Amino acid sequence: MAERDALRELQARLASRMQAVRTEPPVRSWLAVECAGHGLLFALPQAGEIFPLAKVVAVPHTQPWLAGVVNLRGGLHAVVDLARFLGLRGGAPAPALGDGARLLTLSPALGVNCALLVDRLAGLRSADQLQAEPEPAAAARPAFAAARWRDAQARAWQEIDLAALAGHDQFLGIAA
């Protein structure tokens, strides 16, 4: 009898929580990463899986920021050194990446078999942890560079729209 009461109580709590989720406004959430010391945010619905750094096979005659290709779960993915692509690391190849380096695939919904090489994962962030920064008057930034945010420690975070990045001409133009 006690098990039945516990099950009913659990079902009631779940039903109550599901109703609350339906009525609450959605909270924006991001995956936070670091590239060459810069904080970047990726919307969770646009991000795919996270993998440890695997053996990347170089591809000749491509842009310097294309690190190569890698097999992830049986699928071939182009690997973009995101810091180099964004110009954060300059023209130099990635330094010896530490154990924190990861490959982050783009969501399959974006239709691009690509993994971004990031230096380190920095966890999850939500809109209630960050404060939007005002837009500079004459900010010339690419279309994939979305809002800028600051956290409680005054660290700046640049939101990257992965859908816009996946369709950006420079990102798609990998031939050297």
Image (tube, rainbow, N blue to C red):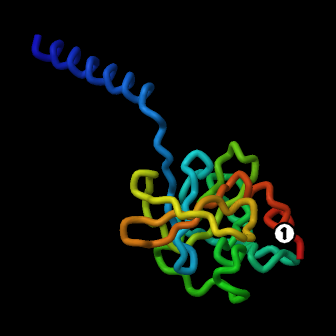
Q: Is residue 163 left or right of residue 40?
A: right
In the displayed structure, would residue 26 be above or below residue 72?
Answer: above
- Which sits in the foreground, 26 or 77? 26
Secondary structure, mark 1, is loop
Q: Position of residue 174 (x, y in %)?
A: 84, 69
Q: Position of residue 127 (x, y in %)?
A: 46, 51
Q: Position of residue 56 (x, y in %)?
A: 67, 72
- Which sits in the foreground, 41 or 9? 41
Q: Quadrant of the N terminus?
A: top left
Res. 76 in view: no
In the displayed structure, would residue 154 be above or below residue 47?
Answer: below
In the displayed structure, would residue 143 be above or below residue 64?
Answer: above
**Outermost residue, front direction?**
137
Q: Quadrant of the C terminus?
A: bottom right
Identify the image quadrant of residue 165. bottom right
- Which sits in the foreground, 8 or 138? 138
Identify the image quadrant of residue 76. bottom right
Residue at numbered disc 1: 174
Q: Is residue 8 left or right of residue 40?
A: left
Query: What amino acid is labelled 1 in the image?
Result: Ile
The residue shown at (75%, 47%) is 111
Q: Position of residue 152 (x, y in %)?
A: 37, 66
- Which sits in the foreground, 75 or 131? 131
The residue shown at (79%, 55%) is 167
The residue shown at (67%, 63%) is 145
Res. 119 in view: yes
